[in-house]
Each structure stands twice: as structure tokens, then as C-alpha cells.
Image (cartoon, rainbow, N blue to C red):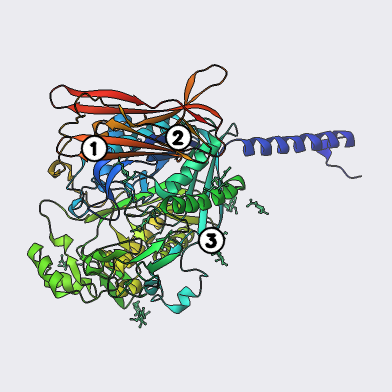
Amino acid sequence: MVVNSSLGRPENMYSEMFLSLLIVFLTWNLSSAAPNYLIGAGIADMTGPAADVNMMGYANPGQVTGGIHLRMYARAFVIAEPDDSKRFVFVSIDGGMQGQGVTLEVVKQLKAKFGDRYTEKNVAISGTHSHSGPAGFLTEVLFQVTSLGFIKDTFDAFVNGIVKSIVKADEDLQPGDIYMNQGHLYNASINRSPSAYENNPAEERAMYSHNVDTNMTVLRLVSEKGEDIGMINWFAVHGTSMNNTNKLISGDNKGYASYLMEQYYNKGARPGKGRFVAAFAQSNLGDVSPNTKGAKCIDTGLPCERNSSTCNGKTENCIAFGPGRDMFESTEIIAEKQYNRAMELYKNASMKLSGHIGFVHQYVDMHNQTAHYNDSFTGKTCKSSMGFSFAAGTTDGPGAFSFTQGDTEGTIFWKIVRDAIKTPSKELIECQKPKPILLPTGEMDFPYEWQANIVDTQILRIGSFGIIVVPGEFTTMAGRRLRNTVREAMIASGAPKNTTVVIAGLSNTYADYITTYEEYQVQRYEGASTIYGPHTFRFYENQYERIAKDLVKGVVPPPGPTPPDLLPSQIALLPPVVFDRVPFRKNFGDIVTDVKSSYVKNSTALVTFRAGNPRNDLKTDKTFLSIKYQDPVTNEWNEIYNDADWCTRFYWNRTSTLFGLSEVTIHWDIPYNAASGNYQIHHYGNAKDLFRGMKSYEGISSIFKVQ
Ligand SMILES: *[C@@H]1O[C@H](CO)[C@@H](O)[C@H](O)[C@H]1NC(C)=O
Ligand SMILES: *[C@@H]1O[C@H](CO)[C@@H](O)[C@H](O)[C@H]1NC(C)=O
Ligand SMILES: *[C@@H]1O[C@H](CO)[C@@H](O)[C@H](O)[C@H]1NC(C)=O
Ligand SMILES: *[C@@H]1O[C@H](CO)[C@@H](O)[C@H](O)[C@H]1NC(C)=O
Ligand SMILES: *[C@@H]1O[C@H](CO)[C@@H](O)[C@H](O)[C@H]1NC(C)=O
Ligand SMILES: *[C@@H]1O[C@H](CO)[C@@H](O)[C@H](O)[C@H]1NC(C)=O
Ligand SMILES: *[C@@H]1O[C@H](CO)[C@@H](O)[C@H](O)[C@H]1NC(C)=O
Ligand SMILES: *[C@@H]1O[C@H](CO)[C@@H](O)[C@H](O)[C@H]1NC(C)=O
Ligand SMILES: *[C@@H]1O[C@H](CO)[C@@H](O)[C@H](O)[C@H]1NC(C)=O
Ligand SMILES: CC(=O)N[C@H]1CO[C@H](CO)[C@@H](O)[C@@H]1O
């Protein structure tokens, strides 16, 4: 046997081989054990006022908050290099969208607390688009028309909740790994503007089997100790399972999916208080509805006219319905579909992310930018404008009057009304064509900005995974084009060939919808709400391509123009709570209608109390109600559910505006697996006395049996 002289005798060679194998094994083992990142997760309550405040989403002036079904949460994830040389935070909020005023205030507070650790460049905040949260947090006029201006209580609840969730995630930072998985989820979404989608080139549509994205992407965050600390999931579907008649605050289908997963991993913890944080974040949902039964005419039961979504010319009768018997069950079904699929993907996630953390951010003034198509064709973006079809709403929540979708003409009557507000300039009319302009918001600045002119563009990176953070609602096809372009730009600049990207929708600034150029021509609701004109999408595509290259090459682009601080100019018209009263010889917390003495499982317990206005105290991190169970061994009363649980509903009703009287009704849907025994329902409130100020009170139901 010929042996390497340095190894000496054969037995030495074997032992040395064994030794080097051992070393290889040990180093391999050690290197696979050393986590690739620092990770941290945090959750905080951001529920706004549960009374009197218009809800964000449907722009229905009659839809004002009157209670709580689910509390709203901010869910934050800090991800850093193992030596903490670079980090970013991604936050998903149960709100309608993220607004620029909120983002600027969050960053300001983070700077005060942490110095340069968090800035507008490495903080990304994305809204889930629930249409059942309070409005008034956006600082631009258009979104304040139905909410009677700015609502400071909503704004503060959002800012405080987001900041708190980031502080918690920051404190939680620890070594850990991130695993990715992707799969499809069918039958949880439909395209609500197929006639616009079908205007995209046939060759392009032929590349996809559905007119909505069925992909779900999941990140699994696991600590060094092997503990599950959180999940982030992206799937495109609107938060419109609860319809425009709902008055209870709710995170809609995504909020409930988060609740289900957090309850699964945080056994025994109250909602929002557990260790594990599960974000069901939003993506390119522009034309995607959860109302899977589709639209029909509610008067005749027949299909609506497809291009305009009307019934006999009327918009308000064409409504889409979810898969359930009512909106609660529809929310439950769409949430459970997302939750079940996310759990499968989460448990199976095995693609371990590696490679550097990165982020890139640039503000852009969206007016008058050049969209480059090819060497012989460019287009220009315009000052913002809403088209006529915007006022038609969608089949998830139709508008009123005579507006219809697919309107490229406009009607004389509404042009006169509009002109009384503001006549669009000739250039703007020309630039926005074929959109007939209802509101030339970019030319309106009274009393302050009507829609954002300067928006955030941003991309976050975890090695071969990219998060495209976008300031609005990209449609299915616009999102596909954007993902393809960004992924290719990243790979061309040196990112791994297997780079995967997701779109995080409604982030940092809200600049409405983004359709493709072809969809824009059809002027459905989404096209009418593509505010910077027909070339909006193409410009964004160019912009994200540029910053994707910068990100991978390590180039820091210029910051771009600074967005205006609109906070000092905000106008608030919603009157404050003046006083709360109870009838003569009655007290706050008195029972109006008591519970029954016993209930069977699977039925609903109800109790009504005399109450104050829930706006008096938002009960952040607390609750307006408690379902208590008497422990049969110790006889102690323990809270088992509160106002953040799915099985409870907290309704607030004003019974007399003149006399300041109001009541709350608490519903408890007794689960089929509830323990038999004694229960009691508590209500915690605050009442405002005209002379003596605020005082807290408690109402307690009689004890009842569940058997
Ligand atoms: C969708 O998910 C599949 C895995 O099921 C993956 O191969 C594909 O690349 C994903 N597509 C997009 C656009 O993310
Ligand atoms: C609906 O729109 C399509 C194009 O998107 C058009 O071909 C068709 O004629 C329209 N149908 C009606 C009834 O207007
Ligand atoms: C909203 O849902 C309820 C059922 O929960 C239904 O009765 C009502 O018609 C729906 N309204 C609209 C406008 O969709
Ligand atoms: C998990 O992944 C394996 C292998 O890719 C696959 O066969 C299995 O079906 C997956 N399980 C679930 C629950 O998705
Ligand atoms: C738009 O930008 C071009 C330069 O690209 C400039 O010539 C033009 O005056 C600008 N138009 C407006 C309305 O600002
Ligand atoms: C350039 O783009 C425009 C708009 O998409 C298209 O109509 C035109 O055919 C393209 N020209 C070339 C040379 O690709
Ligand atoms: C991408 O490929 C690299 C090497 O080819 C591998 O180490 C990494 O795990 C892959 N990442 C994903 C997310 O598949
Ligand atoms: C309170 O409001 C709910 C929902 O609007 C309604 O069903 C209920 O009857 C009202 N209760 C009272 C006491 O007015
Ligand atoms: C509870 O009610 C649901 C429908 O409301 C029914 O499907 C289920 O079987 C019931 N369960 C029990 C244990 O009664
Ligand atoms: C019940 C239902 O709609 N099932 C559909 C789910 O999605 C798949 C794939 O698109 C269809 O084949 C089923 O018909």
C-alpha cells in the first residue's frame, strides 16, 4: 500500500482520517447549528375607538363603529445579521392600510427611543386591509370625507400599537433561523373585475392558470433553542368578508386567521398576550375578493351586467357574497382556509434562508415621472385623480347614486357637481385619459393635501428572499409583472438564481390602486382608483427595478423628496363625547336584560347593561368584557374569554343622543366544547359625567349554568 509519507504508519492514517472526518462532521454540525440571523417578534393592541367613528374601507358614511368582534393588532418582526450589523423591521397591522402620517410619526418616535437603529429606510409597515377598522388615521383629505376629518384617537391607537410592537420585537431579538415555503390555496378568492383582467394580452394571461394569484408564501421563524417564535405569510385577498353593514371592529379574515394560529401556538394565553406571533400579511389584492360566490343582483338573483357590475343600470343591487350563510361565517371560512394552508406550509417549511440582510428605500414624487416602455415609447405619470367609477365602489361594497364601473365617459350631472368643487385642468384631463375625472385630487390642496404626491418605495432582503414593499393595492397581473421584474433585476445584479420575492401591499403610504396599463383602459373601480394615470404601474415597475439593482449592488440611492408633515394642519370635526347619562335612579353597569339561568352548549348567552361611550377609554391591552368561569375545585372565577375572542361580540348602542343614554349588549357564542359549570359575564366601562368627569364602572350578569 502506498501511503503519504507524512502520515506514517497505516494505523496512523486511519486514525487521522477518522480525526479529520470527525472535525469535518463537527464543523458541519456547528456551522449548521450556528443560526443565520437574529430574529424577534412582537405584538401589540392597536384597536381604535369602538364607537361613533366611520369605518375605513367602504366609504359608507352610515357605517360607524359600534362595538368589537376582534381586537386589532400590530405584529412586528425584526430580522438582523447575526452580528447585528444590519437589520430591518416588518410590521403587519390589522388596519385598512398604512398611511404616511402614521409611518412618519412611528419613525419619529422610534428615532427618539433608539437613535438611528430604525429609520424610514428599514421600517416597513403593511396593512391587512380589513374594512372593519376605524377611519381617520390617514392624513389626506380624500380619506377623511366620510370620517368627518382626522380622528386623533384612531391615529394615536395605530401609532402607539405599532411602536409598542416594534419595541417588543426589538427586545425579543435572539439568534434564530428563517425557513420558507410556498404553496397554493384555491377557492379562497376570486377576481372581482374579470373584464379588466381580460384586457391584458392573451399571451400573458396564458402563462397563468387563474385570474387571481393562488400562491401563499410562508416564513417560519425559529429560535436557536428550537422554539417557534413567529410566522409571516403573504396571500392576496381583500379584507371584505365583513360587509358594509358591519359595525363591529374586526381584523376580518386575516385578523381571524392570525387569531387562530396564535391561539394554537400560545395555548392558554389571552389574545395578543402570547409569545408566538402570526402575521397574515397582505399582497397584490387589488382585484381580489374573498366573496367567492361572486356577484349577483339581490333583487332578481340573476348575474349582474358583467362589465359595469350593475343590475338594470343600478350599482347598489349588484353585491358579491362569501361562502358562508352570513358575513361572520364567510369571514370564518376564508380565515380557516388561510390558517389551515398556512399551518401545513409552516410545519413543512424546510428551505432555510441564508445570505445578507438588506434594505433599500426611496421617496418619489409620483407626478410627472417618466415611465419607460422601450426605446421608442415612454409615458408620463399625472397629478392624482379619481375617476367616475371610483364612486361606483365594488361588488364587495357598492357605491350609490348613478355611478357605474367601467365608465370611461362620466355623466353631465356629476361633472357639474364636481366642477362646483374643482374643475380639472386641461393637461390633467389629457394626462389621465381615458379616465373621466371625478375628483382632480392632485390639483386640490384645500384645506390640505387630498392624496399623497410623494410615496415610499422600498425593498427588504433576507439573502435569496425579497419583500417588495408597495404603497397601495397592485392588481393580480400588475403584481405578477412587478415580481418578475424585481426578481430578474435582483438576479441580474448578483442575487442567487433561486431568489423568491413577495409583494407586501398597502405599505408605508396609501396611494390607492395600481392596475396594468391595459386594465386601466377598462376603468373598473381599480382603474378609476389608479390615481397617477395610465402609466402609474409602468413607472412603479421601472422604479422598483432601479432600487432592486441598487439593493443587490449595495448602492444607496438618493433619499428622494421629503414628504410633507400634514399633522399640524389636520382638521377634526367629529364631536367629542359630551356626557353619558343613565335614567333617574339607575347606575352605569346596571343590567337591562339579564342572562338566562342556564344555556346549552352551542347556543348564545346575551346580556345588556347601561353603559358609557366606549370612546371614553379604548381599553388598550384590556377589555370591555370578560367571560368568567368558576373553577369547580377552587371556586375561583377566572376569565376565559374577553372582547378579543371570536366567540364574543361586544355591541354598543346609543339609545338616546339627546339624553346621552347608551347600552352595551354582550353576545357569547358558547363553544360546543365549553366546560359545564357556572359562568358570569362582566362589562368594564367608563362614563363621562358633565360635571364630575370620567369614572369607571363595572356591570356583572347573574351567574348562569352551561350544561
Ligand atoms: C408559487 O408557488 C410555487 C410552489 O407551489 C412556486 O414554485 C412558484 O414559484 C410560486 N410562484 C410565485 C410567483 O411566487
Ligand atoms: C365588455 O367588455 C369587453 C372588453 O373588456 C368587450 O369586448 C365587450 O363587448 C363588453 N360587453 C358589453 C356588453 O359591453
Ligand atoms: C351583509 O351581510 C349580511 C349577513 O351577515 C346580509 O344580511 C346583508 O345583506 C349583507 N349586506 C351587504 C350590503 O352585503
Ligand atoms: C410536506 O412536504 C412533503 C415533501 O415536500 C410533502 O410530500 C408533503 O405533502 C408536505 N406536507 C404538507 C402537509 O404539506
Ligand atoms: C414635467 O417634466 C418635464 C421634464 O421631464 C418638464 O419639461 C415639464 O415642464 C414638467 N411638467 C409639469 C406639468 O410639471
Ligand atoms: C413599445 O411599447 C409600446 C407600448 O407598450 C408598444 O405599443 C410598442 O409596440 C413597443 N415598441 C417596440 C419597438 O417594442
Ligand atoms: C438557494 O440556493 C442556494 C444554493 O444554490 C441554497 O443554499 C439556498 O438554500 C437556496 N435558497 C432557497 C430559499 O431555496
Ligand atoms: C344593538 O345593535 C345591534 C346591532 O346593530 C342590534 O342587533 C341590537 O338589537 C341593538 N340592541 C339594542 C338594545 O338596541
Ligand atoms: C353546533 O352547531 C353547529 C351549527 O350551528 C352544528 O353544525 C354542530 O353540529 C353543533 N354541535 C353540537 C355539539 O351540537
Ligand atoms: C369547490 C370549488 O370551487 N373547488 C374548486 C377549487 O379550486 C380548484 C382549482 O382551481 C377547482 O378545480 C375546484 O373546482
- Indicate whether 148 appears above or below 633: below
Which residue ends up furthest to the top in the rendered image? 634
Helix, strand or loop under label 3: loop
Residue 134, numbered circle: none
Q: Amino acid at mark 1?
A: Asp
Instruction: Note whether ligand 10 is within 8 Å of mark 3.
Output: yes
Task: Find residue 67 and report its horizontal and vertical position in percent.
Answer: 32, 40
Helix, strand or loop under label 2: loop
Helix, strand or loop under label 1: helix
| Residue with the mark numbered 3 | 186
Q: Amino acid at mark 2?
A: Pro
Of labels 2 and 1, earlier in sequence is 1
Tell me the residue at 39%/68% (across/down).
Answer: 296
Q: CA distance from mark 1 to mark 3?
A: 39 Å
**Quadrant where the image shows the N terminus:** top right
Residue 153, numbered circle: 1
| Residue with the mark numbered 2 | 271
Find residue 474 and report its image quarter.
bottom left
Q: CA distance from mark 2 to mark 3?
A: 28 Å
Task: Find residue 503 and report its horizontal and vertical position in percent.
Answer: 42, 55
Picture quarter with ligand 1: bottom right
- Indicate whether 576 appears above or below 314: above
Tag 2 and tag 3, C-beta contact below 8 Å: no
Tell me the residue at 76%/38% (across/down).
Answer: 21
The reply, left or right, for residue 611 in relation to residue 238 is left
**Quadrant where the image shows the C terminus:** top right
Q: Amino acid at mark 3?
A: Tyr
